[in-house]
Amino acid sequence: MKGSAVVEKVIAEIERYVKKEMGEDPTGHDWHHVDRVRKNALLFADGEAAGDRNIIEMAALLHDIPDEKLNKSAEAGRKKLDEFLDRLGLEHTTKQKINEIVYSISFKGGNGAELPSIEAKIVQDADRLDAIGAIGIARAFAYGGKKGQQIHAPNLGIRENMTLDEYRNGKSSSINHFYEKLLKLKGLMNTETAIKMAEERQLFMEAFLTQFEREWDCLL
Ligand code: ADP
Ligand code: NI
């Protein structure tokens, strides 16, 4: 890639764009989520002593821009990212690397496909880390509320091996989402630093769920 002054300018431009597009999203996909993903991704890159930091930073900043949940369709999201990357005037290979990361990292029901690069593994870990722990709990209920699902629905069974359509559109509750996705994320982390950070967050979510059940059952 080009010199560091140029990279800094490109990153500042991406930041401006992402703030404008997702700044105050109420579902947990706001600018602050993106900024934490960027910061944690750079931490994991340090821990691994691997990966192209510029590519990691750009992909982390852009990772939710084409997300089908946040756009009219997957196609509309793809078009939006394409047009922005074209406007940035990046080299073709840089654009390709960013696209490869952004489109490979989503959980989408947990398909578990092998990722194409260390950069993708790092950005995926940072995105997943932000879905667990105290922040993850807050985001799950924010997303669930926006989606119109209940906080807890004891009669709804926990789903295993969902298709993407079932994962996105099937009936669930925010508490079920912990068992269907969030508690599994620790075991799916790629990098040492993320695995370490996930441990404390996992314990916190487990303690939260235990307390939630006690209160739900009106136990003394
Ligand atoms: P993906 O959409 O691929 O699962 P994301 O990282 O975009 O991955 O998910 C973002 C956030 O949305 C996470 O914090 C996750 O907990 C939340 N989320 C997704 N589906 C649900 C759901 N059904 N209920 C509650 N939260 C959800
Ligand atoms: Ni995200």
Image (cartoon, rainbow, N blue to C red):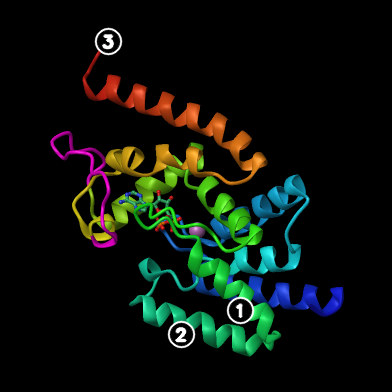
**183 part of magenta stretch:** no
Q: Where's residue 214, x and y in %?
A: 29, 19
**Disc 2: CA contacts within 10 A as few (<14), some (14-19) or many (>=20):** few
Q: Residue at x 46, y 73 (%)?
A: 66
Disc 1 packing (10 Å; few <14; some 14–19; many ≥20): few
Q: Hey, what amino acid is under mark 1?
A: Gln
Residue appearing at x 47%, y 59% in the figure: 29
In space, the residues marked 3 and 1 are separated at their CA atoms by 57 Å
Mark 3 or 1 closer to N-term? Answer: 1
Label 3 vs 2, first from the N-terminus: 2
Image marks 3 and 1: residues in contact by CB distance under 8 Å: no
Residue that extends furthest to the left in the rendered view of this protein: 155
In this rendering, the answer to whether 63 lies above or below 84 is: above
Quarter that holds the C terminus? top left
Q: Please, what secondary structure does the residue beneath circle 2 have?
A: helix
Q: Is residue 6 left or right of residue 122?
A: right
The residue under label 3 is 220
Q: Is residue 158 magenta?
A: yes
Query: Which residue was labeled with disc 1?
Result: 96
Q: Quadrant of residue 94?
A: bottom right
Relative placement, left or right, of 214 versus 157 is right
Residue at the outermost top position: 220
Of the residues tagged 3 and 1, which is closer to the observer? Answer: 1
Q: What secondary structure is the stretch in magenta mostly built from?
A: loop
Q: Toward the viewer: 198 or 96?
A: 96
Mark identifier at residue 120: none
Q: Secondary structure at mark 1?
A: helix
* Disc 2: which residue: 79
Q: Is residue 219 left or right of residue 64?
A: left
Across and down, in percent, residue 9 comes to 77, 77
Magenta stretch in the rendered image: 150-165
Q: Amino acid at mark 2?
A: Lys
